[in-house]
Amino acid sequence: MKPLSWMERSVYYPLIVAGALVAANLPGEEREPARPAAYRASVREAPRLAIPGWDDPVYALHDAEILEQTAYWNAQFASLPGYEPLDPEVVKAMVLKEAGGDLDAFAYDPLQIANAGDFALHVLRDGLEVSVPPGGYADLQDIQETPRGRKTVQKTVKGEKVPVEISFWDYGSHEHRITPELSIRYGIRWLWQKNMRFDEVVVEDHASPLLSYTVQPGDCLDTIAKKQGTTVETLKTYSDIDNPSLIRPGQLLHFKPARRSLMVVGLRGWDKALEDYNSRASYAEDVMDMVESIDGD
């Protein structure tokens, strides 16, 4: 197939994407329908996230959603230690890097979170990591990952047209496919996940009354903590223990229910988040170069 010229893209591509938005909501799906008309209208009204070299109006199609969802997730995580807001221009550069060269990817999954074999969709849909709601995000529950397909295309080799088999992300193979709105919304959420720093902390039930335990022969703080549903740190705090090796039978210990839990304790920085979002060599550097070119243009 002959690649589309820039002029052809500017004419046909909005129609392709509009068709993708409608097709993503086939009869029988239990999801809110896509909103192609309102979506396209909001794009026309939104400020442009212009990146030099990507001036075709086609590439502004997702700008409104990028701005809206970046602001939404920034507000959700503004209280985290070391908070630094995500720049929507970074997200726009990611979209262009991830899907700017593939019409179908740009139309359906601009941040490429639903590709078969990747973790993003599974983690966010099924609640598999800390900070993701138990059971995952509700509007991802019906979304299936995008499988790889194979097709034969005609390519010119030494001046002759020959059939060549290629692989591609087959967005048309199933009904419950990703939509561009969900891709942008949860692609940004996945980037925040990659930015988070986790550590084990003691989570104490402060509402509980102070409980007591009498040390038995052979006890140590570790075994007591496991039996009583608390932690060594909590036992030491409420029982004024400096040396845990010196507890003795008959000693009365005090504690509250507590557990050790993995929690978000800070942020790693957007450079590291980008490196983990896509591990391809130079991905993070390429994205930031695009963003820096805006100021230098």
Image (cartoon, rainbow, N blue to C red):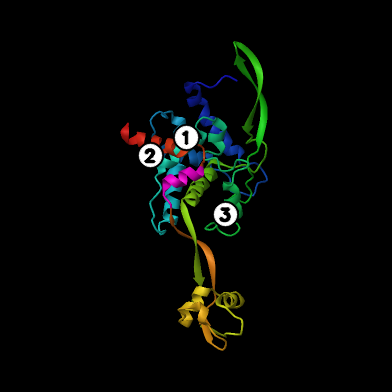
Q: Nearer the viewer, mark 2 or mark 1?
A: 1
Q: Are marks 2 and 1 in contact (CB under 8 Å)?
A: no
Q: Where is 85 relative to 247, above or below? A: above
How many marks do you count on the picture?
3
User: Which mark, residue 96?
Assistant: 1
- Residue at image point 36% right, 33% down: 293
- Residue at image point 51% right, 36% down: 98
Q: Nearer the viewer, mark 2 or mark 3?
A: 3
Residue at disc 1, secondary structure = helix
| Residue named by callout 3 | 137
Q: How far across and how far down the image is residue 95, in percent?
A: 48, 38
Q: Quadrant of the C terminus?
A: top left
Quarter of the image holding residue 226?
A: bottom right
Q: Are marks 2 and 3 in contact (CB under 8 Å)?
A: no
Determine the CA span between mark 2 and mark 1: 17 Å
Out of 119 and 280, give the one closest to the viewer.
280
SS majority, magenta = helix
| Residue named by callout 2 | 47
Residue at disc 3, secondary structure = loop
Q: Which residues are magenta?
A: 268-277
Residue extending furthest bottom? 250
- Residue at image point 36% right, 37% down: 292
116 relative to 17 in the view: left or right:
right
Residue at disc 2, secondary structure = loop
User: Which mark, residue 65?
Assistant: none
